[in-house]
Image: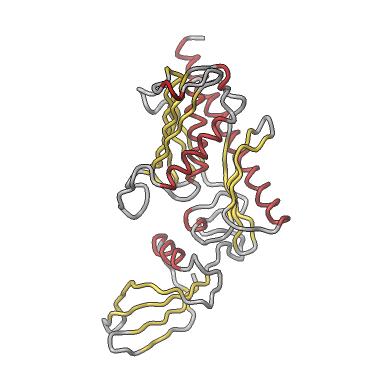
Amino acid sequence: MKLRFVGVDRSGAVWASEPVFIKMSKREIVKLTLLSAQSNSATTPTKTTTTIRGGARRLLTLCVWTDMEYVNPEGLRLDGRRPMEMRQLRGEIGVVSRADGSAVFEMGNTKVIAAVYGPREVQNRSQQLNDQALVRCEYSMANFSTGDRMRRPKGDRRSTEISLVIRQTMEACILTHLMPRSQIDIFVQVLQADGGTRSACINAATLALADAGIPMRDLVTSCGAGYLNGTPLLDLNYVEDSAGGPDVTVGILPKLDKVTLLQMDAKLQMDTFENVMQLAIEGCKAVASYIREILLENTKQLESRRGV
């Protein structure tokens, strides 16, 4: 990373350094990225109250100009991936014994657990639907899921919004008309967050629904893509997602070729948007292929246990 430091010590003396290349740890890169997330200009200073000890053991307050390269000249991102390369996927079903269906899904360092209960009798009769099943979803983040150990209030605005997004996405694939006057509860919790938590939650919920035997039109899968430094990037991690650039989250039914979710956090030119969205769709298809492999392998294990 290329940095230029400007500092003021307690005596009021101002010092500055020439632009230098510094080898930094992942945590330090994340910190500096968050500081510069509000500005895409490398010449606009971003201030921090963090103090460090200078060469003469003086406490210094830093202003940092960052020149972050999200894709280096060799075509590699900060974590070593190519722009159109996804993070490593990992999934497992049947992780919660008391749930009707459950799954753990990982996208890189992002890890999510999902549990499904139902179809079962509706607990609140006033919410019962006579022609279809009632789908409910609850999203939450573990207090230890991110670097800061802050207590996360239950039912905050962000959690409510993501719960609604997951529920609407799942309703698009569940054959609710086959289960009238019943209730399906989906619980999703982020155990470790490193970008793309929304997509990971949807993928984990899909696996859990399949494990519970809930009838679905198709497997709904989700993936995100962004646009940084003039380059479309697939499956953003936390550092890239915190850069403040446009990103698109897509959910699709791959066999039916239908979009069930489309969210974008910033404006994009139409031709750029189409490229980024198509990249996210390709990521969704790759996730769907991996989920099918997990379900097929699980089916083979069940057949072997039964001696089929």
Q: Position of residue 90 (x, y in %)?
A: 48, 37
In the image shown, does 179 or 223 lie closer to the viewer?
179
Q: Does residue 170 appear to the left or right of 109 in the view shown?
A: right
When the figure is inspected, residue 135 is found, relative to residue 144, above or below; the finding is above
Residue found 68% across the figure and 53% down from its top: 273
Residue found 35% across the figure and 22% down from its top: 98
Q: Does residue 125 appear to the left or right of 297 in the view shown?
A: left
Q: Does residue 210 appear to the left or right of 58 in the view shown?
A: right
Q: Quadrant of residue 175?
A: top right
Q: Residue furthest left?
A: 57
Q: Position of residue 280 (x, y in %)?
A: 62, 46
Q: How many marks?
A: 0
In the image shown, does 174 or 291 lie closer to the viewer?
174
When the figure is inspected, residue 54 is found, relative to residue 124, above or below; the finding is below
Q: Position of residue 290 (x, y in %)?
A: 56, 34
Q: Position of residue 60 (x, y in %)?
A: 32, 80
In the image shown, does 219 or 285 lie closer to the viewer?
219
Residue 82 visible (yes or no): no
Q: Residue furthest top?
A: 307
